[in-house]
Every structure is written in C-alpha cells, then in structure tokens.
C-alpha cells in the first residue's frame, strides 16, 4: 500500500543522527561566506530569507503553515541568527529533503 511504501522510504535514524552531528555540515552553517551566514547579514526580510532557505533545500516555496511556524519560532527565540540556523537544520532533517537529496 501507499502507507507501507512511505514507511519503507522513511530515512533511518542513523542517517538523521549523522546529519545532526556531521562536523562538515556544522562548519558550513558557520562559514562566513556560506548561505546561512550571508542571509543572516543580508538586508533581506525574514520572509525573503525563509523563501531562500526553502528554495535551496526543498526546491519549493514555504506553505502558509511553514511561514507561520517560522514566524512563531522567530518570535520565540528572538535572534534572527538562531531562527535561520534552526530553520536550516529543520529543513535538511525533513523527510522531504533526505529522500530527495
């Protein structure tokens, strides 16, 4: 069934844990010339940054729900830097990203 197929395509826990702890990936997030740090320092709005992160990772625009989740998180953490890094982490750890890339 479609449901069984979805479960079979679910990324394995070790794969998810690797993405969360990979030192090379961590370094890219903090690279002053990298996408995340460039966005943090840019004059772009939070909304424009969110769109760029979604296009770069999932090749699609964020949904209304995605936009609301980001806005809620941004208010909660307060820091633009923290909100954008958290969002990038969340995006690369989604099943949508892992299964497509």
Image: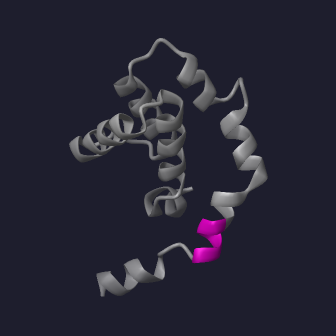
Query: Residue 59 vs residue 15: left or right?
Result: left
**Which of the two residues, 73 or 91, is positioned nearer the viewer here?**
73
Residue 68 lies in what quarter of the image?
top left
Q: Describe residue 1's horizontal placement relative to residue 53 as left or right.
A: left
User: Residue at 47% of width from left, 11% of height from top?
Assistant: 43
Is residue 95 located in the magenta-colored stretch of the structure? no
Q: Is residue 76 visible?
A: yes
| Residue interval drawn in magenta | 13-17
| Residue 64 on image: x %, y % | 22, 41
Q: Is residue 8 above or below residue 82?
A: below
Residue at the spot x=44%, y=59% of the render?
Answer: 96
Frontmost residue, 58 versus 47: 47
| Vertical comparison of 6 with 74: above or below | below
Q: Choose top left, top right, bottom left or bottom right for residue 52.
A: top left
Res. 61 visible in picture: no
- The percent position of residue 24, horizontal first and vertical second, equals 77, 48
Residue ID at (67%, 29%): 34
- Image x and y of residue 61, in percent: 34, 38
Quarter-of-image position of residue 15: bottom right
Q: Quadrant of the C terminus?
A: bottom right
For residue 16: magenta? Answer: yes
Q: Would residue 55 appear left or right of 23 to someone viewing this image?
A: left
The x, y position of residue 9, in whole percent, is 47, 76
At a point 59% along the width and 31% down the height, the residue shown is 36
């Amino acid at each position: 069934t479609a449901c069984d197929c979805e479960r079979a395509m679910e990324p394995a826990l070790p794969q998810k844990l690797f993405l969360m702890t990979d030192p090379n990936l961590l370094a890219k997030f903090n690279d002053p010339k990298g996408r995340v740090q460039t966005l943090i320092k840019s004059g772009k709005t939070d909304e424009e940054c969110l769109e760029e992160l979604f296009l770069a990772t999932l090749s699609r625009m964020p949904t209304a729900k995605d936009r609301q989740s980001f806005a809620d998180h941004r208010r909660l953490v307060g820091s633009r830097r923290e909100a954008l890094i958290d969002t990038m982490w969340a995006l690369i750890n989604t099943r949508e990203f892992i299964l497509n890339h």
